[in-house]
């Protein structure tokens, strides 16, 4: 019988699994939307940006839920860890100018998805029947 995974490793793996799931969902959704809308690379339409934003928010909820659910304890703390990583990466990406995406879209995508990940963690905590910090 395999030994139990140490909690610190389980925490890292839970946040990593949440982030990987989120990235995969965003990539799949983005590729499907770009293909369906015949988007020319570097020239996104407002409709495409709206679909991409919705997919990003749903993927963030899923990522937060997965991180919280796999953590085994303190589910919201694990969703918060994912949200902090997301916010940091978003801010780093905003430093590099993008001609393809408007600044207000970039700002919204830096602010809203981390909160969506927290919502996913909250949903997982409720589903697990534990308090926010237990």
Image (spheres, rainbow, N blue to C red):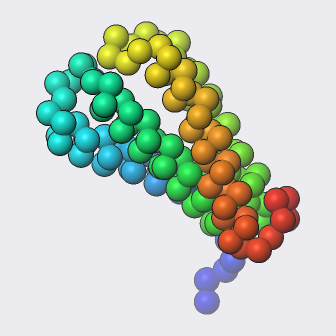
Residue 59 is situated, as x and y percent measured from the top left of the image, at 47, 49
Residue positioned 61% across, 83% down in the render: 2
Asked if residue 13 shows in the view, the reply is no
Is residue 36 visible in the rendered image? The answer is: yes
Q: For the point 32% across and 25% down, which residue is it? A: 46
Answer above or below: position of 110 versus 8.
above
The location of residue 132, given as percent across then percent down, is 82, 59
For this view, does 75 lie left or right of residue 92?
right
Report the number of discs: 0
Image quadrant for the N terminus? bottom right
Looking at the image, residue 56 sits to the left or right of residue 118; the answer is left
Q: What is the x, y in percent for residue 69?
A: 64, 66
Check the image and name the residue furthest to the front.
Answer: 47
Q: Position of residue 87 (x, y in %)?
A: 62, 31
Is residue 33 depicted above or below 13 in this figure?
A: above
Q: Quadrant of residue 44?
A: top left
Whether residue 75 sits left or right of residue 12 in the image: it is right
At 31% from the left and 40% from the top, the residue drawn is 30
Q: Nearer the viewer, residue 96 or 118?
A: 118
Instruction: Indicate the quadrant containing the C terminus: top left, top right, bottom left or bottom right.
Output: bottom right
Q: Is residue 100 left or right of residue 34?
A: right
Residue sitting at x 47%, y 13% = 103
Q: Is residue 37 above or below residue 69?
A: above
Relative to the observer, which residue lies in front, 34 or 133? Answer: 34
Q: Residue furthest bottom?
A: 1
């Amino acid at each position: 019988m395999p030994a139990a995974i140490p909690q610190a490793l389980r925490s890292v793996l839970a946040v990593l699994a949440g982030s990987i799931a989120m990235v995969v969902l965003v990539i799949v959704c983005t590729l499907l939307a770009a293909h369906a809308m015949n988007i020319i690379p570097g020239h996104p339409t407002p409709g495409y940006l709206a679909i991409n934003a919705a997919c990003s928010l749903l993927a963030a909820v899923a990522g937060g839920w997965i991180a919280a659910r796999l953590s085994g304890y303190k589910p919201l703390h694990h969703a918060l860890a994912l949200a902090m990583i997301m916010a940091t990466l978003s801010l780093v990406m905003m430093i590099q100018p993008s001609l393809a995406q408007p600044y207000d879209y970039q700002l919204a995508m830096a602010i809203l998805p981390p909160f969506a990940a927290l919502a996913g963690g909250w949903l997982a905590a409720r589903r697990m029947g534990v308090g926010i910090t237990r």
